[in-house]
Amino acid sequence: MTTEQPEIRILKKANCPTLSGKSTLTYHIGCTAESEIFLRIHSNDGGGFFSQEWVAWKDIRQMLEKVPKATPITSIVLHRLFKGKSVNTPAFLLAVLKHEKLIQPIKSKKRSHELVDPGAFLAKVDKLMSSNTTRKATKKAPVRKTAKKAPAKKKATASRRK
């Protein structure tokens, strides 16, 4: 059974580094007519596959809030949102959440984060929703370029060895 994707108005386009800092992501924040907030990864200048699907903020928040307070947040927490999709997407989404100040790094633990009060983020999104501004998305995300393979060397045949 397929469900129809609601029409999402893009409120914000922004860039942020990946968690590794090796590439830059472009992401969108959008909303439905009913003011439901969505996020998605739009492009990655460093290669690596990812899903461009919109993910509801309420679903992201629900996953983050399931993590016990004493347990650090890592991208593994978000894997269930992208079941059967690229394994890069949860880490890319975590980078977006960090950039939007919805999570912050735990200084004593590498690759670990903690939840931050989303009040400031939600206030910014509410302001964008009430502005009636719509950003246009590019029709197609950049395609990952692959290196050209060198032509295979031909094997010497018996007739060439004579």
Image (spheres, grey):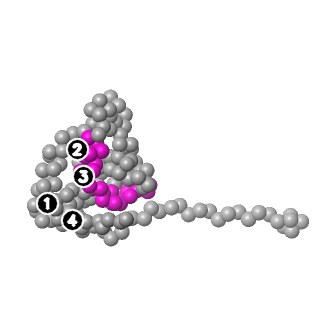
Disc 4 vs disc 2: Cβ atoms closer than 8 Å? no
> Is residue 27 left or right of 35 when viewed as pictured?
right
Q: Nearer the viewer, residue 57 or 52?
A: 57
Residue 42 located within the stretch drawn in magenta: yes
Q: Which residue is drawn at 23% across and 44% down?
A: 102
Q: Distance between the residues labelled 4 and 2?
A: 22 Å
Q: How far apart are marks 1 and 4 (CA)?
A: 9 Å
Say which of marks 3 and 1 sits in front: 3
Q: Name the residue under label 1.
A: 129
Query: Who comes first in sequence, dot 3 or dot 1?
Result: 3
Q: Which numbered disc covers residue 19?
A: none
The reply to whether the C-beta atoms of the residues labelled 1 and 2 are less than 8 Å apart is no
The residue pinned by badge 4 equals: 9
What separation in Å lies between label 1 and label 2 (alpha carbons)?
Answer: 19 Å
Give the number of the disc on residue 57. 3
Give the mark, 1 or 4, whose residue is nearer the N terminus. Answer: 4
Horizontal and vertical percent for residue 107? 30, 31
| Amino acid at pointer 2 | Lys
